[in-house]
Image (tube, rainbow, N blue to C red):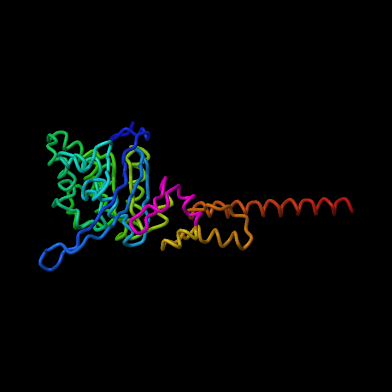
């Protein structure tokens, strides 16, 4: 069993039932002008322990959808359930936000404390966690995300990736069941993105923490258990990464592209190389190319041996 949650992976952790949401537009005098529908009849289930990537172009509704999970937004129509609790009826609402914490795009907007350990302690301290338990949680979570050596450092002295790891540590200190990431790697450099994703994948695998990752990055989505594609406020595709990325024309129609490794694999297959469909990562492509190279090398060795054998027979 994990340190923070029971990775049973059986129950429906998140449920959307015919959810629609309208943003209200206001005039210069703060009077309501109109309502803009951002979500339309969204129905989906996420199981406990799943790692789900949510894809879609700008304005597709993916960020609006994820903000319903921890009661930042509430449905105009329909129902959102978190572990069976209706988010509109949750009292107090902080219990929902403790169970499903959000990591946002800009790490600077999430930093509260003047030191790393103070920032990590902020959430559980406001929950009323006793001092001895609070210190234990801060120590555990900083070690978990690899920031123990930075505990007294000002967050302003950290890189973007390190700041996002501080934000993750702050969530972990509150013992969440789910981490929601709203374009949380978009402002990071490649190394920072790698750091954050490695931590989140490890937490998902070892602690059973449910993860929903809103992203534009197709390579990030390739590492998920399941992919949800949104367009114009609706869920238009759902399946495993291999299932979704095999539907090339549909993805292009929704303004998305395949991962670079998948595109290259497709081009090599069209050029005649025996590469299977469904390649998602650079590692998978490299392995397939290695297999082809080894097969060709072995084939050449066999032909060479046969040729030598025929020469010996002649002599």
| Magenta region includes residue 65 | no
Say which residue appears at 22% left-offset and 58% top-offset. Answer: 23
User: How far across and how far down the image is residue 278, in percent?
Assistant: 52, 52
Q: Quadrant of residue 233?
A: bottom left
User: How far across and how far down the image is residue 70, in percent?
Assistant: 23, 45
Q: Is residue 178 above or below residue 56?
A: above
Residue at the farthest bottom position: 28
Residue at the farthest top position: 1
In the image: residue 265, left or right of residue 122 = right
User: How far across and how far down the image is residue 288, in percent?
Assistant: 57, 52
| Magenta region includes residue 225 | yes
The N terminus lies in which quarter of the figure? Answer: top left
In this orientation, which residue lies closer to the viewer: 22 or 267? 22
In the image: residue 130, left or right of residue 8 = left
Residue at the farthest right position: 314
Residue at the farthest left position: 29
The range drawn in magenta is 224-247
In this orientation, which residue lies closer to the viewer: 26 or 241? 26
User: How far across and how far down the image is residue 60, in percent?
Assistant: 33, 59
Q: Is residue 234 above or below residue 98?
A: below
Say which residue appears at 60% left-offset and 61% top-offset. Answer: 270
In the image: residue 303, left or right of residue 146 = right
Total numbered circles: 0
């Amino acid at each position: 069993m994990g340190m923070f949650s029971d990775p049973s992976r059986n129950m429906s952790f998140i449920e959307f039932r015919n959810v629609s949401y309208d943003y209200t537009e206001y005039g210069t005098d703060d009077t309501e002008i109109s309502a803009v529908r951002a979500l339309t009849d969204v129905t989906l289930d996420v199981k406990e322990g799943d790692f789900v990537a949510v894809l879609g172009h700008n304005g597709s509704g993916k960020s609006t959808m994820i903000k319903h999970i921890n009661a930042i937004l509430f449905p105009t129509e329909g129902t959102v359930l978190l572990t069976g609790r209706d988010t509109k009826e949750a009292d107090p609402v902080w219990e929902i936000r403790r169970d499903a914490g959000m990591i946002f795009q800009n790490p600077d907007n999430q930093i509260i404390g003047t030191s790393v350990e103070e920032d990590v302690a902020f959430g559980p301290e406001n929950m009323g966690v006793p001092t001895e338990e609070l210190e234990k949680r801060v120590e555990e979570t900083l070690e978990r995300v690899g920031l123990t050596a930075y505990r007294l450092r000002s967050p302003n002295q950290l890189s973007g990736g390190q700041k996002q790891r501080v934000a993750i540590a702050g969530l972990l200190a509150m013992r969440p069941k789910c981490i929601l990431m709203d374009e949380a790697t978009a402002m990071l450099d490649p190394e920072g993105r790698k750091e954050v994703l490695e931590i989140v994948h490890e937490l998902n695998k070892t602690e059973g923490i449910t993860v929903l990752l809103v992203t534009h990055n197709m390579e990030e989505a390739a590492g998920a258990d399941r992919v949800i594609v949104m367009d114009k406020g609706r869920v238009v595709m759902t399946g495993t990464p291999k299932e979704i990325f095999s539907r090339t024309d549909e993805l292009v129609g929704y303004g998305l592209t395949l991962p670079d490794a998948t595109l290259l694999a497709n081009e090599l297959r069209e050029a005649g190389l025996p590469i299977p469909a469904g390649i998602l990562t650079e590692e998978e492509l490299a392995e397939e190319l290695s297999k082809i190279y080894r097969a060709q090398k072995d084939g050449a060795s066999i032909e060479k041996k046969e040729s030598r054998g025929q020469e010996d027979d002649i002599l």
